[in-house]
Amino acid sequence: MVIAPPGSTALYTDAYELTMLTSAIAEGIADRPAVFECFCRRLPEPYRFGILAGLGRALDAIEDFRFTAEELDWLQETEVIDDSTAQWLDGRTFSGRITAYPEGELYSPGSPVLTVEAPLGEAMILETLLLSIINHDTAVATKAARIRVAARERSLAEMGSRRTHEVGAVAAARAAWIAGFDATSNLAAGHQYDVPTMGTAAHAWTLAHEHEAAAFDAQIAALGVDTTLLVDTYDIPTGIERAVEAARRAGSAGPGAIRLDSGDLALEAKRARRQLDELGATATRIVVSGDLDEFRIAELATSPIDSYGVGTKLVSGLPNPGFVYKLVQITYGGVHHDVEKSSSGKHSDGGRKSARRRRGPDGRLEEQITVLPTDDESGLRRPTDGIDPEGWRGLQRLVWDGARVDRSDAAAARAHHAAVMADLPSAARALDSGEPAVRVHGP
């Protein structure tokens, strides 16, 4: 299921892709076999690693990538395409092959994370759709992975829906869960991707009652005593005292948790823990929120906090991974030609590539080598099985001759990501600038 308005995803593209297609059809080269690769040239500062996300969503979108009669009519009326292009597109679905890293995998600059092998016209018009999904979801997943490193074993909830586009919010919740968050406040993500959901009450709930205690009593009556009470609408110590009293009226020593959303969180968490313990609510957890990111959470590492709610800085204003989608091989005259871009600062290496990884003496990941695999019987360069001699799984088959062969869900991506992060040396998880998690050598 793709998170987009109902119908085709074919217009999630840029006009220049269809003008190129129109030219290719006129020239008679639209059906030439071609290979495109998706890769980034560098990691954003200060990141030492990147986490690939969005593949499941991208495959959903490709399955829905077909131009409807209404869309083709509109494209002709607005002179984006001509009659020949409309005929070429009519009823056409993707017929090629897609290989990629498993979703949730670590990626390195220069090495393709996704490869499309298809007729030139089909491969060209997927560029914008693929890049918009992968760049967005990877940005969120990488940020979320860094936040998970900073939070250590403490619980993390994604709460950014009100700070981004309504469709992007669902994608962000999915990507954050893959990268180690425990839950989301976004119900659409729960419904579409089985991401665990959570949520209790906002300040408006307290303000809607004549007294703070009445708000707490009503919330406990509706949701149970294990609910989380927001105690900083007015005065925090008073709010904590009233939260404990409300829990006692319901037969418990304290509520399941209290949430702090303002002030000096380190100081307020210490004060709250001391007050809760003095009141006998030793099992009540402390949840904090409020413009948190990995750096702020790292600063709170010694505070008596049990859980973090993260929103704005996870879903907005993130450094873009900078993934690009480049033609690296084209076939004509019965010969496969490697092609590459030589522009200053935007160079790309020609030829169908894969990667292999090596491990250090401690058994952890150490370096990655981008390689040009041996031509197989079809003449197109592709990895044989995607597994290097030391067991790392690289490019895997996702779509083969137009048929989707991989339907791994977000839960599988989350499990794979957890294994990837466990395999990284501790230094590679550092939040400041430094050497990349995996050293990279080109072809």
Image: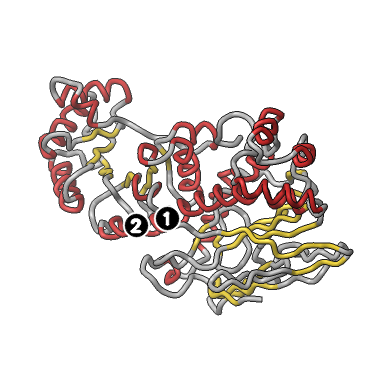
Residue found 84% across the figure and 62% down from its top: 332
**For the residue labelled by badge 2, is the local secondary structure a helix, a strand or a loop?**
helix
| Front position in the image: 358 or 303 | 358
Q: Residue at x 70, y 72 (%)?
A: 389
Q: Residue at x 70, y 33 (%)?
A: 72
Which label belongs to residue 427? none
Residue at the bottom extreme, as displayed = 361
Q: Is residue 97 left or right of residue 55?
A: right
Measuring from the top left, give residue 344's x and y in whole percent. 55, 73
Residue occupying image coordinates x 54% and y 60% = 420
Quarter placement of the N terminus = top right
Q: Quadrant of residue 227?
A: top left
Q: Which quarter of the figure has residue 330?
A: bottom right
Q: Position of residue 145 (x, y in %)?
A: 44, 56
Residue topped by disc 1: 143
Which amino acid, by three-letter code, is at mark 2? Glu
Q: Is residue 347 above or below residue 155?
A: below
Relative image position of residue 152 (x, y in whole percent): 37, 57
On screen, 154 above or below 428? above
Where is residue 392 shown, x and y percent of the image?
64, 65
- Disc 1 marks a residue whose amino acid type is Lys
Helix, strand or loop under label 1? helix
Q: Are marks 2 and 1 in contact (CB under 8 Å)?
A: yes
Q: Dot 2 corresponds to which residue?
A: 294
Q: Nearer the viewer, residue 301 or 371?
A: 371
